[in-house]
Image (cartoon, rainbow, N blue to C red):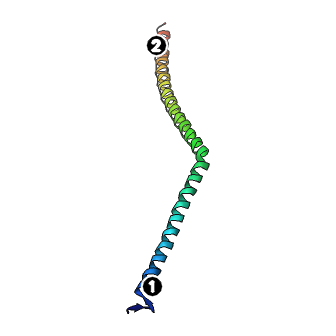
Amino acid sequence: MHTLLGYSWAEIASIMAVISVLFSSVYWLIRHGAKALNNAITIGTYPLQQQFKELTSTIKQLNSNFDEQRKSLKKLEDEVEEHDKTILLHDEKIKRLEERK
């Protein structure tokens, strides 16, 4: 009969079957444990996730408001500049009129 390391082929096949069952069981336990741990973490951090979503939404709204304020400020600066030019023109006209007198 054929042997390998003193074991017959049937014994080697039995040992391999036992080893593969053990490894499969360990693999299943690790996967199942990882899923359970992941679910527990997800459930535990759900309120924090919601707060992050609210915070993100608030920050986006603030950025939108800041953009609107920048546009409004730029428009206001342009209007002030136009009024400043108009005032300078009126001052020059007044000076010319006073010089004519």
Q: CA distance from mark 1 to mark 2?
A: 115 Å
Residue designated by label 2: 93
Q: Nearer the viewer, residue 73 or 95?
A: 73
For label 2, the SS is helix
Mark closer to the chain start, 1 or 2: 1
Which kind of residue does numbered mark 2 sit on? Lys
How many numbered circles are shown?
Answer: 2
- From the top left corner, tell me how far across and down residue 75 is, in percent: 47, 25
In the visual, does 41 lie left or right of 24? right
Which kind of residue does numbered mark 1 sit on? Glu
Residue designated by label 1: 11
- Residue at horizontal 47 percent and vertical 16 percent from the top: 92
- From the top left corner, tell me how far across and down residue 63 is, in percent: 52, 36
Q: Nearer the viewer, residue 44 or 9?
A: 9
In the visual, does 74 lie left or right of 47? left
From the viewer's perspective, is residue 3 above or below residue 39? Answer: below
In front: label 1 or label 2: 1
- Residue at horizontal 42 percent and vertical 84 percent from the top: 10
- Residue at horizontal 53 percent and vertical 64 percent from the top: 30
> Around disc 1, counting alpha carbons within 10 Å, would you say few (fewer than 14), some (14 to 19), or many (20 or more)?
few
Q: Nearer the viewer, residue 41 or 76?
A: 41
For the N terminus, the quadrant is: bottom left
Query: As drawn, which residue projects farthest toward the top?
Result: 101
- From the top left corner, tell me how far across and down residue 24 is, in percent: 48, 69
- Residue at horizontal 50 percent and vertical 16 percent from the top: 91
From the viewer's perspective, is residue 12 above or below residue 32? Answer: below
- From the top left corner, tell me how far across and down residue 26 is, in percent: 52, 69
> Around disc 2, counting alpha carbons within 10 Å, would you say few (fewer than 14), some (14 to 19), or many (20 or more)?
few
